[in-house]
Image (tube, rainbow, N blue to C red):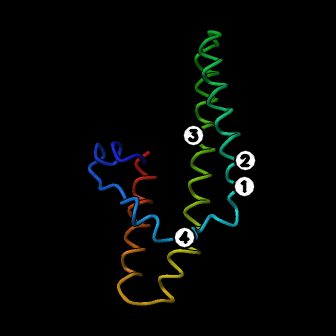
Amino acid sequence: MTTTEAVEAGEQAQDPEQAQDHKTHGYHKQKDEHLKRLRRIEGQIRGLQRMVEEDVYCIDILTQVSAGTKALQSFALQLLEEHLRHCVADAAVKGGDEIDAKVEEATKAIARMLRT
């Protein structure tokens, strides 16, 4: 989510400096796999553009929109799982107030996903 989108959604965007505090993200082990998956999703979206340009039947386009949406949701769930396993679990091991902050952060991310 961009800063503009966060503001429009009434949420506070994560400070880029705060994001840099975590040098290793939960998805780092799967980064190449995630990039490959995102490129496939990008291809699906470009396919939607072609369908519109070629005046494809609207129901067929909607079917592909649904497939693209599900692909993004699946990617988001995988990323969330990795966040929970890495970042939230790490905060739990460290103890203190950090665990509460990480759980709240994950809860807000889940809420955003449910709104879509």
Q: CA distance from mark 4 to mark 3?
A: 30 Å
Disc number lying in front (2 or 4): 4
Residue highlighted by disc 4: 23
Task: Return the mark for residue 19.
Answer: none
First reached walking from the N terminus: tag 4 or tag 3: 4
Q: Position of residue 44 (x, y in %)?
A: 67, 32
SS under mark 2:
helix
Disc number lying in front (3 or 2): 2
Whether label 1 touches label 3, CB < 8 Å: no
First reached walking from the N terminus: tag 3 or tag 2: 2
Task: Count neighbours of disc 3 (C-alpha within 10 A) and say few if under 14, some if 14 to 19, many if 20 or more.
Answer: some
Task: Count neighbours of disc 1 (C-alpha within 10 A) and say few if under 14, some if 14 to 19, many if 20 or more.
Answer: few
What amino acid type should be assigned to the residue bearing mark 2? Lys
Residue highlighted by disc 3: 69
Q: Position of residue 47 (x, y in %)?
A: 67, 25
Q: Position of residue 50 (x, y in %)?
A: 65, 18
SS under mark 3:
helix
First reached walking from the N terminus: tag 4 or tag 1: 4
User: Eyeballing the image, is 63 above or below 111?
Assistant: above
SS under mark 4:
loop
What amino acid type should be assigned to the residue bearing mark 3? Thr
Residue highlighted by disc 1: 32
What amino acid type should be assigned to the residue bearing mark 1? Asp
User: Eyeballing the image, is 72 above or below 14?
Assistant: above
